[in-house]
Image (spheres, rainbow, N blue to C red):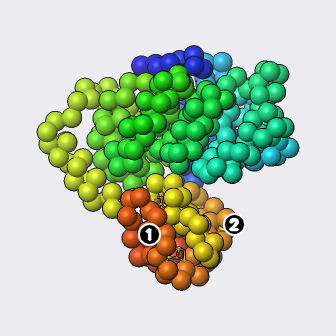
């Protein structure tokens, strides 16, 4: 499989990496088989996170004996030095490795979060120390918010940036990617299949292959999914006129209801985490029921029932999404799913 240089990290990664969110949803033996099939197909970059429940541990089991040829990336949403130190220790243990190739600050999508990461003795200082100690080889950041991502790139404190990029959410291609190139920051495209919303894999991958230096990390749950993507990679990537037309059609169909999770719609006067609710169709495809129907996401949907329909969020959304209408629909879907979950039907 073709390899590309991941910016100033100098690491040679396969053009296609493995995104470790969906393997939380399947039984452990299936998850391990999926990771092993990816390795057989030649993939050398695996991405996971402290927050993806069983994902790190499952990857750790799958890669046993093959660590040397792999590039492992994980991330943490900790916003204090103390917390990130414990997350790093846990990641090393779960993955069963002595070092992490790329350690990333997860979902840094507002100014306060970036400030917390950069604070003296904060998370970045702790991970830089871990780098000096050889526990981490390179440091990156992930975000859904383009202004924060640009600020992070310009700070020159990170070696990679992970940001959504697909043919619906393609804003990063215009300014963020060129900026990352200027600073020699490796660009990792998250959600290449629109977080599970783009069914046409061929078009989704062909669109992204126009960016030769971008690493794609689709979330993979089953073996046939990765095999299909690898097949597309082996074809010429130029789109036919018909494919272009179809891509435009999907863009029109999904674009008016596709939440980028950028949080420009905040603050909501009653404190609703709008993007959690708006991402429901995508999250329902990728997360295990326990994460959807208990804990943080369940709380977000509970809060959404208190929406006063003031419409302030819609005035701020740059993509003009009908937030109130979509939230009402997803709150209903979530409640129905939760009932099923509680009676053990999921
Ligand atoms: S419409 Fe609802 S979600 Fe949007 S800002 Fe108002 S209360 Fe918050
Ligand atoms: S609703 Fe709009 S502003 Fe809010 S997170 Fe989604 S895309 Fe961004």
Mark 2 CB lies closer than 8 A to ligand 2: no
Q: Residue at x 66, y 68 (%)?
A: 294
- Choose top left, top right, bottom left or bottom right for residue 325: bottom left
**With 294 as the anchor, is 180 left or right in this view?**
left
Mark 1 CB lies closer than 8 A to ligand 1: yes
Front residue (pair 131, 231) = 131
Q: Residues within 10 Å of mark 1 (few under 14, many from 20)?
A: some
Front residue (pair 232, 275) = 275
Q: Residue at x 64, y 49 (%)?
A: 111
Q: CA distance from mark 2 to mark 1?
A: 27 Å
Query: In the rendered image, which residue does mark 1 sit on?
Result: 314
Query: In the rendered image, which residue does mark 2 sit on?
Result: 295
Which structural element holds mark 2? helix
* Quadrant housing the C terminus: bottom right
Residue 321 shows in the view: yes
Q: Position of residue 202 (x, y in %)?
A: 29, 40
Q: Residue at x 46, y 54 (%)?
A: 260
Marks 2 and 1, the one that precedes in the sequence: 2
- Choose top left, top right, bottom left or bottom right for residue 139: top right
Q: Residues within 10 Å of mark 2 (few under 14, many from 20)?
A: few
Q: Residue at x 38, y 59 (%)?
A: 319
Residue 41 shows in the view: no
Q: Position of residue 138 (x, y in %)?
A: 67, 25
Which structural element holds mark 1? helix
Q: Position of residue 16 (x, y in %)?
A: 45, 30
Using the image, tell me which numbered label, if any, was put on residue 205: none
On screen, 284 above or below 34?
A: below
């Amino acid at each position: 499989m073709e390899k590309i240089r991941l910016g100033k990290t100098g690491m040679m990664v396969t053009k296609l990496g493995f995104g470790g969110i969906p393997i939380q949803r399947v039984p452990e033996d299936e998850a391990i088989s999926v990771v092993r099939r990816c390795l057989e197909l030649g993939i050398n970059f695996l991405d996971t996170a402290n927050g993806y429940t069983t994902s790190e541990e499952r990857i750790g089991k799958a890669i046993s004996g093959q660590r040397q040829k792999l590039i492992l990336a994980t991330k943490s949403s900790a916003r204090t030095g103390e917390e990130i130190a414990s997350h790093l220790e846990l990641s090393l243990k779960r993955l069963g490795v002595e070092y992490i190739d790329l350690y990333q600050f997860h979902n840094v999508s507002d100014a306060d979060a970036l400030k917390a990461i950069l604070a003296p003795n904060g998370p970045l200082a702790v991970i830089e120390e871990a780098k000096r100690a050889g526990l981490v080889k390179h440091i990156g950041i992930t975000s859904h918010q383009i202004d924060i991502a640009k600020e992070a790139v310009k700070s020159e404190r990170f070696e990679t940036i992970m940001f959504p990029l697909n043919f619906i959410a393609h804003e990063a291609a215009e300014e963020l990617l060129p900026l990352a190139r200027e600073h020699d920051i490796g660009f990792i495209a998250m959600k290449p299949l629109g977080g599970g919303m783009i069914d046409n894999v061929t078009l989704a991958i062909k669109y992204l292959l126009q960016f030769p230096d971008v690493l794609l990390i689709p979330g993979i749950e089953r073996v046939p999914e990765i095999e299909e993507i690898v097949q597309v990679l082996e074809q010429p990537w130029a789109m036919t006129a018909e494919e272009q037309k179809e891509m435009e059609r999907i863009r029109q169909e999904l674009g008016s209801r596709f939440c980028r999770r950028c949080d420009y719609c905040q603050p909501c006067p009653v404190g609703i985490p709008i993007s959690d609710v708006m991402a429901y169709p995508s999250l329902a495809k990728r997360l295990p029921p326990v994460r959807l129907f208990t804990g943080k996401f369940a709380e977000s949907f509970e809060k959404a029932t208190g929406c006063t329909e003031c419409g302030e969020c819609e005035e701020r959304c740059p993509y003009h999404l009908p937030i109130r209408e979509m939230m009402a629909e997803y709150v209903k879907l979530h409640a129905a799913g939760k009932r099923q979950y509680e009676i053990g039907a999921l």
